[in-house]
C-alpha cells in the first residue's frame, strides 16, 4: 500500500511524537494490549519515543533493532529469499519483520520500519527517504510506503511518526472491531 506522507520533509517534532506515544499508550492500556517493534532505519527511535512516556512498561514489551540483513533473518525470521528477491528496503521485508516480531516477541501488535535514511545508500530505484512501515496484529498486516525528502535525522523522525500513526490506526480498528463483537 502507498501512504501519502503528511509531512514529506520529515520535520516531525518531538512534541508531536510524544503526543502520538501518549495516545497509543492510553489505547493499549485500556484494552490490555501489548506492542513490540522491529526497527531498521529508525535505529530504536520508536521504542525510545514510547519509553519517554511514563507508564509505557504497562504495554510496551520492547523491540529489536535489526539494522543488518543477518539480524533481520536471525532475530526476526525474515526469509533470506525475500531479502534477496526484493531487497531489505521493501514492502515484503517490512511485512516479514512485523510478523516475525509479533510471533517471536509475543505481543498483540508489532510495528516494523525499513528504509534508507540517507544521506547515502539510495539508488534510482530506491532513493534516499524510501521507507516501508508495517503493522501486524489481530486484524492482519498492513504495510505502507513513504518517500521522505528530509535529511537523515528528519527522515528517521518522519518514519517514527508514520509508524506510530499506523500503529494507532491498527489499535483503534481492533478496538472498534472488539466493541462491535460484544
Image: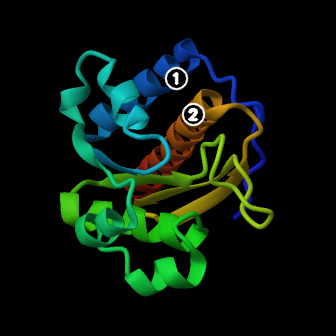
Comparing 37 with 128, the one in front is 128
Q: Which residue is mark 2?
A: 161
Which callout, 1 or 2, points at the residue further toward the start of the chain? 1
Location of residue 45 with respect to 170 vertically, above or below? above
Q: Quadrant of the N terminus?
A: bottom right
Mark 1 packing: few (<14 Cα in 10 Å), some, or many (20+)?
A: many
Q: Which residue is mark 1?
A: 17
Name the image colouring.
Answer: rainbow
Residue 64 placed where, x, y %? 28, 50
Which residue corresponds to the image point at 64% horizontal and 47% vertical from the top-left? 120
Which residue corresponds to the image point at 56% horizontal and 73% vertical from the top-left? 87
Residue 163 placed where, x, y %? 53, 43
Q: Quadrant of the C terminus?
A: bottom left
Residue 43 placed where, x, y %? 41, 40
Which residue corresponds to the image point at 24% horizontal and 70% vertical from the top-left? 74
Q: Say whether residue 95 is left or right of residue 131.
A: left
**Local secondary structure at mark 2:** helix
Q: Say whether residue 126 is left or right of residue 132.
A: right
State the CA–CA distance, disc 1 to disc 2: 6 Å
Which residue corresponds to the image point at 61% horizontal and 51% vertical from the top-left? 116
Residue 104 placed where, x, y %? 21, 65
Q: Are marks 1 and 2 in contact (CB under 8 Å)?
A: yes
**Local secondary structure at mark 1:** helix
Comparing 10 with 100, the one in front is 10
Quadrant hosting residue 148 = top right
Quadrant hosting residue 24 = top left
Amino acid at each position: 500500500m502507498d501512504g501519502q506522507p503528511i509531512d514529506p520533509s520529515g520535520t516531525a517534532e518531538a512534541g508531536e511524537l510524544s503526543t502520538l506515544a501518549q495516545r497509543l499508550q492510553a489505547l493499549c492500556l485500556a484494552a490490555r494490549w501489548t506492542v513490540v517493534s522491529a526497527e531498521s532505519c529508525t535505529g530504536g527511535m520508536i521504542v525510545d519515543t514510547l519509553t519517554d512516556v511514563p507508564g509505557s512498561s504497562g504495554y510496551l514489551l520492547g523491540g529489536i533493532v535489526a539494522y543488518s540483513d543477518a539480524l533481520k533473518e536471525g532475530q526476526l525470521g525474515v526469509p533470506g529469499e525475500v531479502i534477496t528477491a526484493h531487497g531489505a528496503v521493501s514492502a515484503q521485508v517490512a511485512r516479514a519483520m512485523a510478523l516475525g516480531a509479533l510471533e517471536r516477541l509475543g505481543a498483540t501488535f508489532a510495528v516494523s520500519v525499513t528504509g534508507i535514511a540517507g544521506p547515502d545508500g539510495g539508488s534510482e530505484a530506491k532513493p534516499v527517504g524510501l521507507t516501508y512501515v508495517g503493522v501486524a496484529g489481530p486484524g492482519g498486516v498492513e504495510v505502507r510506503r513513504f518517500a521522505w525528502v528530509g535529511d537523515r535525522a528528519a527522515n528517521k523522525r518522519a518514519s517514527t511518526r508514520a509508524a506510530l500513526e499506523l500503529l494507532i490506526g491498527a489499535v483503534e480498528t481492533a478496538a472498534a472491531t472488539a466493541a462491535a463483537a460484544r
